[in-house]
Amino acid sequence: MERIHYAGSSFVTGDLIARALIDYAHFLTAHNTSASVDIPIRRPDGTVGRANFLLGPTSQLVSESEGSRFSELVDNELVELLHDRSIGMHDSHPRPVNELSFNAFSFDYSDLAEYA
């Protein structure tokens, strides 16, 4: 199992899930963009929960190995999805803000000139 430290909290998840999350965070940082990722986590009482991470250029994640008396968390579909996104194979990864077009907005501030 891996403990992920993020935003002052920590979460325990499976080894492959943690590695895929870190790799995807690296990809997002390298492409100056962000995304939200929901992963399974192991709660202290052994039950499975979910945690949602907002990853982007300023995200700071640390992952450390941790022994556990509970079974390894596995989500092969999530790991594959994050891997595909990390190497740019998935069409739905977010685009950086500087690639978005804001041409649809037109503002006229000429009436504010008298206040300057």
Image: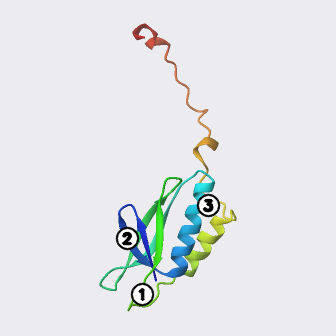
Looking at numbered disc 2 in the image, what kind of residue is underneath it? Answer: Ser
Q: Nearer the viewer, mark 3 or mark 1?
A: 1
Q: Which residue is mark 3?
A: 27
**9 displayed left or right of 107:** left
> Which residue is at a point 61% across and 61% down the rendered structure image?
27
Residue depicted at 56% across the width and 26% down the height: 106
- In the displayed structure, 7 sits above or below 45; it is above
Counting from the top left corner in percent of width and height, residue 108 is at 52, 19
In this orientation, which residue lies closer to the viewer: 90 or 65?
65
Looking at numbered disc 1 in the image, what kind of residue is underneath it? Gly
Give the residue at mark 1. 67
Residue 90 coordinates in the image, percent (x, y): 66, 64
Q: Position of residue 114 (x, y in %)?
A: 42, 7
The quadrant of the picture occupied by the C terminus is top left
Q: Earlier in the sequence, mark 3 or mark 2?
A: 2
Could you tell me which secondary element the residue under label 3 belongs to? helix
Rendered location of residue 8, percent (x, y): 35, 62
Which residue position holds label 2?
Answer: 10
Residue 34's quadrant in the figure? bottom right
Type of amino acid at the residue the image marks with label 3: Phe
Callout 2 environment at 10 Å: few (<14), some (14 to 19), or many (20+)?
A: some
Between discs 3 and 1, the one toward the N terminus: 3
Q: Residue at x 65, y 69 (%)?
A: 84
N-terminal of the pair, mark 1 or mark 2, is 2
